Amino acid sequence: MSYLSRQAANSKIRSASPASVLASLLAAVLLLAAAPLARAAEGDDADAREIQFKPGHSGASVEGTIKGRDSIVYTVRAKSGQRMIVEMQTDNATSYFNIYPPGNGPGDTAMFIGSVKGNRFSGVLAESGIYTIQVYLMRSAARRDETANFSLEVSISAATPASTGGRELAWPEEYDATGDLPCSTGEPGFNRACPFRVKRELPDATIWTTSPATPAGLRVLYFRRGRFSSDDAAEVRWERQGDNWRVAIGEREFYLVPDAVIQGG
Protein backbone atom coordinates (compact mmCIF):
# COMPACT_ATOMS: atom_id res chain seq x y z
CA MET A 1 0.00 0.00 0.00
CA SER A 2 1.37 3.43 -0.90
CA TYR A 3 1.95 6.20 1.57
CA LEU A 4 -1.06 8.15 0.22
CA SER A 5 -3.28 5.06 0.50
CA ARG A 6 -2.24 4.53 4.12
CA GLN A 7 -2.95 8.18 4.87
CA ALA A 8 -6.44 7.95 3.33
CA ALA A 9 -7.26 4.81 5.31
CA ASN A 10 -6.04 6.37 8.56
CA SER A 11 -8.06 9.49 7.82
CA LYS A 12 -11.25 7.40 7.49
CA ILE A 13 -10.58 5.64 10.79
CA ARG A 14 -9.93 8.90 12.61
CA SER A 15 -13.05 10.59 11.19
CA ALA A 16 -15.28 7.82 12.56
CA SER A 17 -14.12 8.07 16.15
CA PRO A 18 -15.08 10.92 18.51
CA ALA A 19 -18.54 12.25 17.60
CA SER A 20 -20.03 9.10 16.07
CA VAL A 21 -18.81 6.78 18.81
CA LEU A 22 -20.18 9.14 21.48
CA ALA A 23 -23.54 9.28 19.69
CA SER A 24 -23.69 5.48 19.47
CA LEU A 25 -22.93 5.12 23.18
CA LEU A 26 -25.57 7.71 24.07
CA ALA A 27 -28.20 5.91 21.96
CA ALA A 28 -27.38 2.61 23.65
CA VAL A 29 -27.75 4.18 27.11
CA LEU A 30 -31.14 5.63 26.20
CA LEU A 31 -32.38 2.28 24.91
CA LEU A 32 -31.33 0.57 28.11
CA ALA A 33 -33.01 3.24 30.22
CA ALA A 34 -36.30 2.77 28.38
CA ALA A 35 -36.24 -1.04 28.39
CA PRO A 36 -38.62 -2.85 30.75
CA LEU A 37 -37.32 -5.06 33.51
CA ALA A 38 -38.08 -8.35 31.78
CA ARG A 39 -36.60 -10.39 34.61
CA ALA A 40 -37.16 -9.90 38.32
CA ALA A 41 -34.05 -8.41 39.85
CA GLU A 42 -32.03 -10.25 42.45
CA GLY A 43 -33.67 -9.94 45.84
CA ASP A 44 -37.24 -9.75 44.45
CA ASP A 45 -39.97 -11.89 45.92
CA ALA A 46 -39.79 -14.81 43.51
CA ASP A 47 -42.92 -16.52 44.85
CA ALA A 48 -45.77 -16.29 42.37
CA ARG A 49 -49.15 -15.32 43.79
CA GLU A 50 -52.07 -17.32 42.43
CA ILE A 51 -55.20 -15.40 41.45
CA GLN A 52 -58.33 -17.34 42.38
CA PHE A 53 -61.93 -16.48 41.60
CA LYS A 54 -64.73 -16.73 44.14
CA PRO A 55 -67.42 -19.33 43.34
CA GLY A 56 -69.84 -17.91 40.78
CA HIS A 57 -67.43 -15.17 39.65
CA SER A 58 -65.37 -15.00 36.47
CA GLY A 59 -63.06 -12.23 37.67
CA ALA A 60 -60.98 -11.01 40.59
CA SER A 61 -59.08 -7.91 41.66
CA VAL A 62 -55.66 -7.76 43.32
CA GLU A 63 -53.70 -4.80 44.66
CA GLY A 64 -50.04 -4.29 45.38
CA THR A 65 -47.04 -2.01 45.58
CA ILE A 66 -43.71 -2.30 43.80
CA LYS A 67 -40.58 -0.26 44.37
CA GLY A 68 -37.36 0.08 42.44
CA ARG A 69 -36.21 -3.15 40.83
CA ASP A 70 -38.85 -5.25 42.57
CA SER A 71 -41.61 -6.90 40.59
CA ILE A 72 -44.67 -8.97 41.56
CA VAL A 73 -45.61 -12.12 39.71
CA TYR A 74 -49.16 -13.49 39.58
CA THR A 75 -50.43 -16.71 38.04
CA VAL A 76 -53.88 -17.64 36.78
CA ARG A 77 -55.11 -20.90 35.31
CA ALA A 78 -57.12 -20.81 32.07
CA LYS A 79 -58.15 -23.01 29.16
CA SER A 80 -57.67 -22.77 25.43
CA GLY A 81 -60.48 -20.81 23.79
CA GLN A 82 -61.32 -18.77 26.90
CA ARG A 83 -61.09 -14.99 26.78
CA MET A 84 -58.83 -13.34 29.34
CA ILE A 85 -58.97 -9.65 30.19
CA VAL A 86 -56.33 -7.97 32.35
CA GLU A 87 -56.56 -4.27 33.18
CA MET A 88 -54.18 -2.30 35.38
CA GLN A 89 -54.71 0.92 37.29
CA THR A 90 -51.56 2.58 38.68
CA ASP A 91 -50.39 5.85 40.18
CA ASN A 92 -47.05 5.62 38.32
CA ALA A 93 -47.11 5.98 34.54
CA THR A 94 -43.87 3.99 34.23
CA SER A 95 -45.33 0.79 35.72
CA TYR A 96 -46.70 -1.92 33.44
CA PHE A 97 -47.44 -5.63 33.26
CA ASN A 98 -46.31 -8.43 30.95
CA ILE A 99 -48.17 -11.70 30.30
CA TYR A 100 -46.40 -14.99 29.63
CA PRO A 101 -47.98 -18.13 28.15
CA PRO A 102 -47.90 -21.51 29.94
CA GLY A 103 -44.35 -22.73 30.46
CA ASN A 104 -42.83 -19.23 30.19
CA GLY A 105 -42.09 -16.56 32.74
CA PRO A 106 -40.04 -13.40 33.37
CA GLY A 107 -36.94 -13.53 31.22
CA ASP A 108 -38.71 -15.50 28.47
CA THR A 109 -40.64 -14.21 25.48
CA ALA A 110 -43.86 -12.49 26.59
CA MET A 111 -47.17 -12.80 24.72
CA PHE A 112 -48.11 -9.28 25.86
CA ILE A 113 -45.75 -6.40 26.75
CA GLY A 114 -47.48 -3.58 28.58
CA SER A 115 -44.83 -0.94 27.90
CA VAL A 116 -45.54 -1.41 24.20
CA LYS A 117 -49.28 -2.11 24.12
CA GLY A 118 -50.61 -0.32 27.19
CA ASN A 119 -52.19 -1.40 30.46
CA ARG A 120 -55.11 -3.43 29.08
CA PHE A 121 -55.06 -6.90 27.54
CA SER A 122 -58.03 -8.71 26.02
CA GLY A 123 -57.63 -11.86 23.98
CA VAL A 124 -58.73 -15.43 23.34
CA LEU A 125 -56.19 -17.86 24.76
CA ALA A 126 -54.45 -20.33 22.49
CA GLU A 127 -53.25 -22.75 25.17
CA SER A 128 -54.50 -24.37 28.35
CA GLY A 129 -52.36 -24.01 31.46
CA ILE A 130 -50.99 -21.46 33.90
CA TYR A 131 -50.49 -17.91 32.62
CA THR A 132 -48.03 -15.59 34.35
CA ILE A 133 -48.55 -11.85 34.87
CA GLN A 134 -45.55 -9.77 35.96
CA VAL A 135 -45.97 -6.20 37.26
CA TYR A 136 -42.83 -4.07 37.01
CA LEU A 137 -41.36 -0.59 36.73
CA MET A 138 -39.47 0.57 33.66
CA ARG A 139 -35.70 0.37 34.13
CA SER A 140 -35.27 4.16 34.30
CA ALA A 141 -37.88 4.43 37.08
CA ALA A 142 -36.43 1.40 38.87
CA ARG A 143 -33.01 3.05 38.97
CA ARG A 144 -34.59 6.10 40.60
CA ASP A 145 -36.11 3.73 43.19
CA GLU A 146 -39.64 4.93 42.38
CA THR A 147 -42.78 3.36 43.85
CA ALA A 148 -46.01 2.30 42.13
CA ASN A 149 -49.30 1.42 43.80
CA PHE A 150 -51.47 -0.61 41.45
CA SER A 151 -54.55 -2.77 41.09
CA LEU A 152 -55.16 -5.54 38.54
CA GLU A 153 -58.59 -6.62 37.31
CA VAL A 154 -58.39 -10.13 35.86
CA SER A 155 -61.35 -11.91 34.30
CA ILE A 156 -61.64 -15.13 32.33
CA SER A 157 -64.85 -15.97 30.51
CA ALA A 158 -65.83 -19.43 29.38
CA ALA A 159 -65.13 -20.39 25.81
CA THR A 160 -67.80 -19.22 23.37
CA PRO A 161 -68.64 -20.76 20.02
CA ALA A 162 -66.49 -19.26 17.28
CA SER A 163 -69.47 -19.04 14.93
CA THR A 164 -70.68 -15.81 16.57
CA GLY A 165 -67.35 -14.03 16.46
CA GLY A 166 -67.45 -10.74 14.61
CA ARG A 167 -70.96 -11.23 13.21
CA GLU A 168 -74.19 -9.47 14.07
CA LEU A 169 -76.29 -11.47 16.52
CA ALA A 170 -79.67 -12.77 15.36
CA TRP A 171 -82.49 -14.84 16.79
CA PRO A 172 -82.00 -18.57 16.08
CA GLU A 173 -84.38 -20.17 13.62
CA GLU A 174 -84.23 -23.48 15.47
CA TYR A 175 -84.77 -23.60 19.22
CA ASP A 176 -86.25 -25.80 21.95
CA ALA A 177 -88.32 -23.31 23.93
CA THR A 178 -89.30 -19.67 24.08
CA GLY A 179 -90.76 -17.37 26.72
CA ASP A 180 -89.80 -14.43 28.96
CA LEU A 181 -86.93 -14.11 31.42
CA PRO A 182 -87.20 -11.86 34.49
CA CYS A 183 -84.61 -9.15 33.90
CA SER A 184 -83.67 -5.61 34.90
CA THR A 185 -81.09 -2.92 34.31
CA GLY A 186 -79.19 -0.83 36.83
CA GLU A 187 -79.97 -3.11 39.78
CA PRO A 188 -81.10 -6.76 40.16
CA GLY A 189 -84.78 -6.04 40.72
CA PHE A 190 -85.99 -8.33 37.87
CA ASN A 191 -88.94 -6.02 37.27
CA ARG A 192 -88.98 -6.49 33.50
CA ALA A 193 -89.58 -9.36 31.08
CA CYS A 194 -87.03 -10.12 28.37
CA PRO A 195 -88.18 -12.48 25.57
CA PHE A 196 -85.85 -15.45 25.06
CA ARG A 197 -85.21 -18.51 22.93
CA VAL A 198 -83.13 -21.44 24.12
CA LYS A 199 -81.28 -24.21 22.33
CA ARG A 200 -80.43 -27.11 24.65
CA GLU A 201 -77.49 -29.48 24.39
CA LEU A 202 -77.91 -31.03 27.81
CA PRO A 203 -76.44 -30.44 30.27
CA ASP A 204 -75.48 -27.24 28.43
CA ALA A 205 -77.64 -24.59 26.79
CA THR A 206 -77.47 -21.39 24.73
CA ILE A 207 -79.98 -18.64 25.49
CA TRP A 208 -80.80 -15.70 23.20
CA THR A 209 -82.62 -12.84 24.92
CA THR A 210 -83.21 -9.13 24.55
CA SER A 211 -80.94 -6.90 26.61
CA PRO A 212 -82.71 -4.82 29.28
CA ALA A 213 -80.02 -2.17 28.84
CA THR A 214 -80.44 -2.09 25.06
CA PRO A 215 -83.90 -3.49 24.21
CA ALA A 216 -83.22 -3.34 20.47
CA GLY A 217 -80.13 -5.53 20.90
CA LEU A 218 -79.63 -9.21 21.65
CA ARG A 219 -77.69 -10.81 24.46
CA VAL A 220 -76.48 -14.42 24.19
CA LEU A 221 -75.87 -16.41 27.38
CA TYR A 222 -73.79 -19.57 27.15
CA PHE A 223 -74.23 -22.13 29.92
CA ARG A 224 -71.34 -24.60 29.84
CA ARG A 225 -70.43 -27.04 32.61
CA GLY A 226 -72.21 -25.03 35.25
CA ARG A 227 -70.66 -21.70 34.20
CA PHE A 228 -72.09 -18.74 32.32
CA SER A 229 -70.38 -16.60 29.69
CA SER A 230 -71.65 -14.13 27.13
CA ASP A 231 -71.17 -12.99 23.55
CA ASP A 232 -68.71 -10.21 24.39
CA ALA A 233 -65.91 -9.48 26.83
CA ALA A 234 -68.12 -8.05 29.63
CA GLU A 235 -67.60 -9.57 33.07
CA VAL A 236 -70.18 -12.26 33.88
CA ARG A 237 -71.21 -13.18 37.44
CA TRP A 238 -73.71 -15.79 38.54
CA GLU A 239 -75.08 -17.41 41.69
CA ARG A 240 -77.82 -19.83 42.70
CA GLN A 241 -81.15 -18.60 44.04
CA GLY A 242 -83.54 -21.47 44.73
CA ASP A 243 -84.26 -23.15 41.40
CA ASN A 244 -82.84 -20.22 39.43
CA TRP A 245 -79.57 -18.68 38.35
CA ARG A 246 -79.02 -14.98 39.02
CA VAL A 247 -76.82 -13.76 36.17
CA ALA A 248 -75.19 -10.30 35.99
CA ILE A 249 -73.51 -8.92 32.87
CA GLY A 250 -71.24 -6.05 33.89
CA GLU A 251 -73.07 -3.58 36.12
CA ARG A 252 -76.10 -2.92 33.87
CA GLU A 253 -77.77 -6.20 32.91
CA PHE A 254 -79.37 -8.70 35.28
CA TYR A 255 -81.25 -11.90 34.43
CA LEU A 256 -83.03 -14.57 36.44
CA VAL A 257 -82.69 -17.87 34.58
CA PRO A 258 -84.86 -20.75 35.89
CA ASP A 259 -83.44 -24.26 35.79
CA ALA A 260 -86.38 -25.23 33.58
CA VAL A 261 -85.10 -22.91 30.84
CA ILE A 262 -81.79 -24.76 30.76
CA GLN A 263 -82.96 -28.30 31.49
CA GLY A 264 -86.48 -28.30 30.10
CA GLY A 265 -89.46 -29.94 31.77
Image: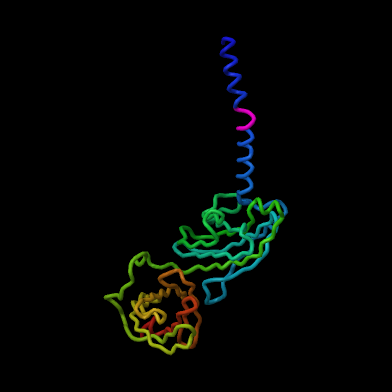
Q: Position of residue 38 (x, y in %)?
A: 61, 51
Q: Residue at x 55, y 61 (%)?
A: 119
Q: Residue at x 52, y 60 (%)?
A: 129
Residue closer to the observer: 127 or 230: 230
- In the orientation shown, which residue stands out farthest toward the bottom? 191
Residue farthest toward the top in the current orientation of the protein: 2
Q: Position of residue 10 (x, y in %)?
A: 61, 19
| Location of residue 123 in the rendering, given as x and y in whole percent from the top left corner | 47, 61
- Vertical arrangement, residue 231 with respect to residue 140, above or below: below
Kindly identify the residue that appears in the image at 38 percent across and 83 percent down.
Answer: 261
- Residue 13 is a magenta residue: no
Q: Is residue 237 left or right of residue 46?
A: left
Quarter of the rendering occupied by the N terminus: top right
Determine the main secondary structure of the stretch shown in magenta.
helix
- Camera-side residue of 218 and 12: 12
Q: Is residue 180 above or below residue 72?
A: below
In this rendering, the answer to whether 105 lies above or below 184 is above
Q: Which quarter shows the C terminus?
A: bottom left
Instruction: Note whether 31 is above or below 162 in the view shown.
Output: above
Q: Identify the magenta region.
A: 16-20
